[in-house]
Image (cartoon, rainbow, N blue to C red):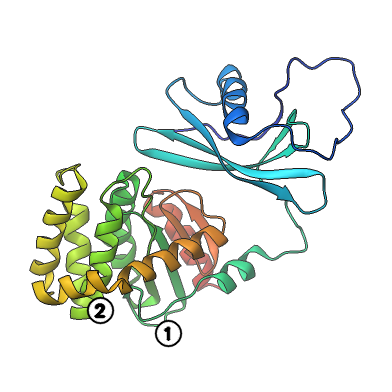
């Protein structure tokens, strides 16, 4: 959807033969002012198409560097991408993407940040040599594609050598019924167990394109799927009202944010990050490498 964006942006005007401005110590622009200027640059540079909307989120001072950090939120037709940026105090210079701390082991950091518990839908043995963790959204079309790849080709190929963990990451600003699907799925897991959950999971993705776009109508459809999977109507109502499933989803979204995940689906294969609905051979290359370690 979006081209890879790697740049340093001068968004205050055309670059000239003048020294870089000294930090003023005051932040001159807010997110609403910054967003259209960043969009103008990205659009003019051919880095985004015309129909991509750009907003700014999470704008805050970044330590004592004199910079502010935030996220450019790029959205188009139900798809989204979050791009981290840093901006100078006068709002002129924008630096895209995160700095890299070469002292940090990204795999160790990922493994430390991922929690796996009985609240997570899982397949396979906890003793498997390879663990795949996916952060996903039931309403995301790329997640549906990834689901068919993982369940149709990857897990069947490796069988007991791989454990698979599914993490709920509904993008509620883009997908109006994804939150309800995640919560009901967790309720099915709590009340009827792993097998029932995976029946529900498969049914939601199989019917993703035909589920009503209206959140209330969609919730009714998804509720029927949860009951058909094995949860009782009474238990589902009680679980949804308790807020327990909502808390599990909120905790998982917070975990994903802490890991720097900005799009779904995102996978971690023994802590090694893989983004998007990649073809089976990409999964195989990473899994094989882990099995050989």
Q: Nearer the viewer, residue 264 or 86?
A: 86
Is 38 rendered above or below residue 290?
above
Whether residue 112 is visible, yes or no, is yes
Q: Which residue is mark 2?
A: 190
Residue 51: % across, % down: 42, 23
| Residue found 18% across the figure and 65% down from its top | 200
Whether residue 166 is visible, yes or no, is no
Say which element carries label 2.
helix
| Residue found 51% across the figure and 26% down from its top | 48
Residue 98: % across, % down: 68, 47
Residue 100: % across, % down: 73, 52
The quarter of the displayed image where residue 13 is located:
top right
| Residue found 74% across the figure and 50% down from its top | 62
Say which element carries label 1.
loop
Q: Residues within 10 Å of mark 2 (few under 14, many from 20)?
A: many
Q: Which residue is mark 1?
A: 127
Disc 2 versus disc 1: nearer the observer: 2
Q: Residues within 10 Å of mark 1 (few under 14, many from 20)?
A: few
Is 158 rendered above or below residue 57?
below
If you read the primary sequence from the N terminus, does the residue marked by circle 2 or circle 1 appear first?
A: 1
Residue 187 is left or right of residue 257, and the answer is: left
């Amino acid at each position: 959807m979006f081209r890879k964006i790697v740049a340093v942006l001068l968004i205050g005007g055309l670059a000239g033969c003048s020294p870089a401005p000294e930090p003023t110590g005051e932040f001159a622009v807010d997110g609403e002012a910054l967003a259209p200027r960043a969009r103008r640059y990205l659009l003019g540079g051919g880095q985004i198409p015309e129909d991509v909307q750009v907003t700014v989120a999470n704008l805050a001072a970044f330590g004592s560097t004199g910079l502010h950090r935030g996220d450019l939120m790029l959205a188009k037709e139900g798809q989204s991408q979050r791009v981290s940026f840093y901006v100078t105090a006068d709002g002129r210079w924008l630096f895209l993407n995160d700095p890299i701390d070469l002292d940090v082991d990204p795999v160790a950091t990922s493994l430390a940040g991922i929690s796996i518990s009985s609240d997570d839908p899982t397949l396979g043995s906890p003793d498997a040599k390879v663990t795949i963790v996916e952060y996903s959204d039931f309403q995301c079309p790329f997640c549906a594609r990834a689901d068919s790849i993982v369940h149709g080709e990857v897990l069947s190929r490796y069988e007991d050598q791989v454990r698979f963990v599914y993490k709920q990451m509904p993008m509620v600003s883009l997908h109006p019924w994804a939150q309800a699907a995640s919560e009901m799925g967790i309720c099915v897991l709590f009340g009827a167990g792993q097998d029932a959950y995976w029946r529900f999971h498969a049914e939601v993705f199989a019917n993703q394109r035909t589920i009503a776009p209206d959140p209330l109508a969609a919730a009714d459809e998804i509720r029927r799927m949860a009951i058909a999977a094995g949860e009782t109507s009474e238990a589902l109502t009680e679980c949804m009202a308790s807020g327990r499933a909502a808390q599990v989803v909120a905790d998982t979204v917070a975990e994903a944010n802490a890991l720097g995940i900005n799009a779904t689906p995102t996978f971690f294969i023994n802590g090694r990050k893989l983004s998007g609905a990649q073809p089976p051979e990409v999964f195989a290359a990473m899994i094989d490498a882990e099995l050989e370690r």
